[in-house]
Amino acid sequence: MSVLYLVPTPIFDNTIKKVLPDEVITFIHNLKQFIVEDIRTARRFLAKIRHPVKFDQLQFHELNEHTTTREKSLLLNYIFNEDTGLMSEAGLPCLADPGAEIVRLAHANSITVVPLTGPSSIFLALIASGLNGQSFSFIGYLPVKQNERISYLHEIEKRSKMYQQTQIFIETPYRNMSLLEDIINCCNPETKLTIAASITSPYEKILTKSIIQWKQGLPDLKKIPTVFLLQASF
């Protein structure tokens, strides 16, 4: 029976040696079939780790937000026939990533799933935040419409206080500042907010402050990959 390997990729360029163990790269070198979000990005990554097989001898199958349910089911046929690497655009597959559906289908069809070690901006941000790492919730993206987003921020702040739980969320980089301003304007002054930007890059910055402290000066997060963590005061 073939195996579905969950293949990590660097979050930033030129960090392969920093975030991927040699053994993981060896695993990837042995794979000839990949399910990827974008073929060009996947090829660029494989070139950087010096995959020994020529690209015209590798199989690539795309999986993204446009992939239909039927197409996802058809991907199983490829996995059944050969060991396959499921690759995210950046970081670990299946976290804020369409790969989770393929893993679910693999389990439903008795296909072995093997995660390979690699970077996750979500978990790196959590452990560096100083917030509660015993109980936390990853929410993903918040609503785009401002009124809905503000309402949801109130909700997760209440949830954080009730369960003493860290709330983790992300945003499309070009909307970071709009989200940050809403957090600052609607959350309790004593609520803690961690801003974790450009994780694993030379420009990485992870800071935890109360909302009232953040009001003294906000960082410029325009177009910068950022993870937000929020914990209400207990």
Image: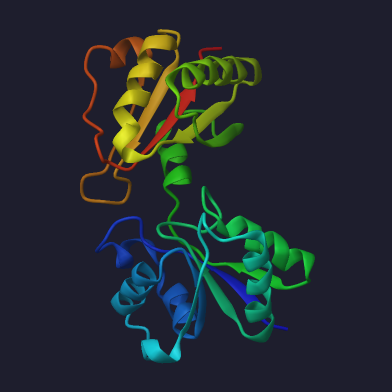
13 up-or-down from 181: above or below: below
91 up-or-down from 228: above or below: below
Q: Position of residue 56 (x, y in %)?
A: 39, 90
Report the side of 141 relative to 177 (left or right): right
Q: Nearer the viewer, residue 53 or 76?
A: 76
In the picture, the quarter occupied by the N terminus is bottom right
In the picture, the quarter occupied by the C terminus is top right
Q: Position of residue 19 (x, y in %)?
A: 37, 61
Q: Position of residue 161 (x, y in %)?
A: 59, 15
Image quadrant where residue 204 sits: top left
Q: Position of residue 47 (x, y in %)?
A: 31, 79
Rendering colour mode: rainbow
123 up-or-down from 189: above or below: below
Q: Residue at x 31, y 51 (%)?
A: 200
75 up-or-down from 208: above or below: below
Image quadrant where residue 180 sits: top left
What is the tally of numbered marks visible in this picture? 0
Q: Residue at x 59, y 34 (%)?
A: 137
In the rendered image, is residue 61 in sight? Answer: yes
In the rendered image, is residue 210 in sight? Answer: no
Q: Residue at x 26, y 40 (%)?
A: 223
Image quadrant where residue 174 sits: top left
Q: Nearer the viewer, residue 183 or 149?
A: 149
